[in-house]
Amino acid sequence: MKILIWVGIGLVVMAAIPFLLLFLGMGFMQLFAISEKKARNELTDIIRTQYDSAWTIKKATRFFNEGNMNPNMFYIELESNQEPKVTFWIYWDAKLKEPRSSYGEKEYSLNSQYQLALEDYAMQKDIEQAIGDEAQLEYIDYWKVKIAVNDGAADFMRKTAQKVTTVIRKYANYRTVHMDVIFLTEEEPDGLYKIEIALTEPRDDLYIGLNTVAKGGELDQIKEKCMEVLTPVLASQRPTYDLRDALLEAWVNQKNVAQFYGVLEATSQKVKGDERIGMQQYEGLMFFHYNMLAHQLTEVRFVEAGKSISDDVKALNAQLPAQYRKPE
């Protein structure tokens, strides 16, 4: 038995040696690397002499990892001195004194990234003008647009999403295919509703969905109510199963957005007593209908697991009334 233990320890040590050598090697490389202070000062001089002090460095941090293996690579955030609201960032090789792209762009320079930032800023201003005073642009990146609204009516959200789509499609640097327009309210600061917009082939029949990852607002209360009602139902039918409190999928009534169908995942422990997520076996879905105005769950039932969660969700979508069903 002792021999087996020592063999096991030896295998663990041998497996750890490459990572230890990598860690020590990276630490050794940093001993001879350019300091953050020097990198910042040298880049500031370049901006002053070559770019007429167009930008100010707001942040400079070393970007050194096992991927680039370059201790002289830095992440730099810059702000326009002409228009302080315009900010952009680059990866900067302090030894070569030039920007270095991590994504293989053909043109990657201080000027090219600044031009993209100017275009982003112009697009944001155009969105603000398009949506008017009834809504406020809070945040935008390549994947989502967050808009604060007072009116959560379905027609208003669809019209706003259409306006955003029209503006974004005019700008070539937005190369993504889809984005989420998320509608923020005082009751749901993360946004309860969202609309996915297609930028390559826009759709007229925009689907209003739930932002199932929202926290700190109304959705938290909905999930608490669901757990309160669904947990004892699952326990009575499948006593050994657990219910996860994440809203796995939701289908909103497109004619009355205060109602939706949803599912929570039911699981079992692969190893008894081990409650880690990775040790949970998918067993099925708790399906329900929720009325947000009445705070009431109806049509509760357990759906036995099929081939996969995605297949089961897709099958449920096909069975729903037309006003809830998501487009394929």
Image: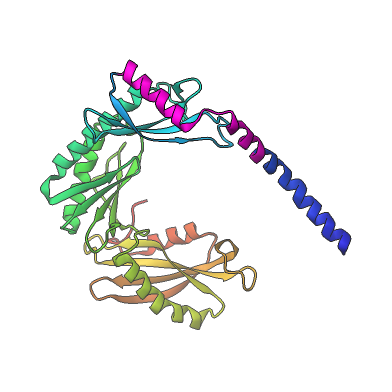
Question: Which residue shows up at 39% across the image and 76% down it?
Answer: 300
Question: Which residue shows up at 42% across the image and 23% down it?
Answer: 42
- Magenta residues span 23-51
* Quarter holding residue 255: bottom left
Whether 263 is among the magenta residues is: no
Whether residue 290 can be seen here: yes
Q: Is residue 26 above or below residue 194?
A: above
* Quarter holding residue 142: top left
* Quarter holding residue 174: top left
Q: Main secondary structure of the magenta part?
A: helix
Q: Position of residue 100 (x, y in %)?
A: 46, 25
Q: Position of residue 132 (x, y in %)?
A: 12, 45
Q: Is residue 172 above or below residue 164?
A: above
Q: Position of residue 52 (x, y in %)?
A: 28, 18
Along the line of sight, which residue is nearer the eye, 36 or 227? 36
Question: Which residue shows up at 30% across the image and 38% down it?
Answer: 199
Question: Which residue shows up at 45% across the image and 81% down it?
Answer: 232
Whether 37 is among the magenta residues is: yes
Q: Position of residue 308 (x, y in %)?
A: 53, 59
Q: Is residue 216 above or below residue 136?
A: below
Along the line of sight, which residue is nearer the eye, 240 or 93? 93
